Image (spheres, coloured by chain):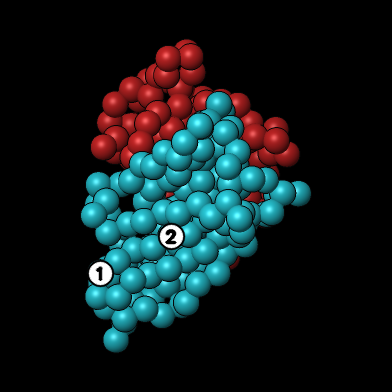
Chain colours: A cyan, B red
Amino acid sequence: QVQLQQSGPGLVKPSQTLSVTCAISGDSVSSNTVAWNWIRQSPSRGLEWLGRTWYWSRWYYEFAVSVKSRITINADTTKNQLLLQLSSVTPEDTAVYYCARWDHEERYFDLWGRGTLVTVSS
Amino acid sequence: DIVMTQSPLSLSVPPGEPASISCRSSQSLLYSNGNNCLNWYLQKPGQSPQLLIYFASSRASGVPDRFSGSGSGTDFTLKISRVEAEDVGVYYCMHALHTPLTFGRGTTVDIK
């Protein structure tokens, strides 16, 4: 059974970097049939897709324009996990952050992590 | 970016009665394989979203057949033939045509 186990600090200070990890079990971060995504949810912005990575002979990345200058997504093949980093955070980045698996062929998110609430506050 | 507009914002339905949610996209979601790239998700209270429908009308594995999706181009509908207590939550449509993937604002369904 595939599972996504998320972890990360719940509180981040403004201007610092937010980091959330998504440990994958039952699948490989290097699978060439899926992409690994980060999505966040807040009352003001709703569900917002942030970016994704996938492997097909090399690593590919796509990011939302709204966070493109601040986001980093890393796939750690040794630990089989995904890492989200968002720099220079403001209170507007306060949200529940989800990792989610995207099926390339069927074009859907078929698996979501349980979410990590990150609050940006001093 | 494709804008996804859902209606209504909320729905209160007696058990056993039908429910219908509309979703409109700002551009056609017709994909090169002939399918419409529209997904429906349900987020139950305290949970992550879960896939209900993909390609506008295909039910995901394990989804009860009281859920059905229809529509093409820019107009889509999710129908629940007989609402049950376990169906409460927020329903989201999402376009799956290309990035950035975007979601509707959601429709909250509760039991009257």
Q: Are marks 1 and 2 in contact (CB under 8 Å)?
A: no
Q: Position of residue A106 (x, y in %)?
A: 56, 28
Q: Residue furthest bottom?
A: A122
Residue B67: name its quadrant. Answer: top right
Residue position for label 1 = A88
The residue type indicated by label 1 comes to: Ser
Which residue sits at x=42%, y=72%? Answer: A118
Secondary element at tag 1:
loop
How crowded is the residue under tag 2: few (<14 C-alpha within 10 Å), some, or many (20+)? many
Distance, label 1 to label 2, CA atoms, is 13 Å
Which residue sits at x=48%, y=14%? Answer: B33
* A83 left or right, relative to A32: left
Q: Is residue B13 visible?
A: no
Which residue sits at x=50%, y=72%? Answer: A8
Which residue sits at x=47%, y=36%? Answer: A58
Q: Position of residue B100 (x, y in %)?
A: 33, 40
Q: Position of residue B4 (x, y in %)?
A: 34, 39
Secondary element at tag 2:
strand
How crowded is the residue under tag 1: few (<14 C-alpha within 10 Å), some, or many (20+)? some
Front-most of B68 and A82? A82
For residue A1, above or below residue A103: below
Residue position for label 2 = A84
Task: Tell me the subunit letter for badge 1.
Answer: A
For residue A41, above or below residue B11: below
The residue type indicated by label 2 comes to: Leu
Please give the count of numbered marks on the rendered protein: 2
Front-most of A112 and A89? A89
Q: Is residue A11 visible?
A: yes
Q: Position of residue B13 (x, y in %)?
A: 56, 49
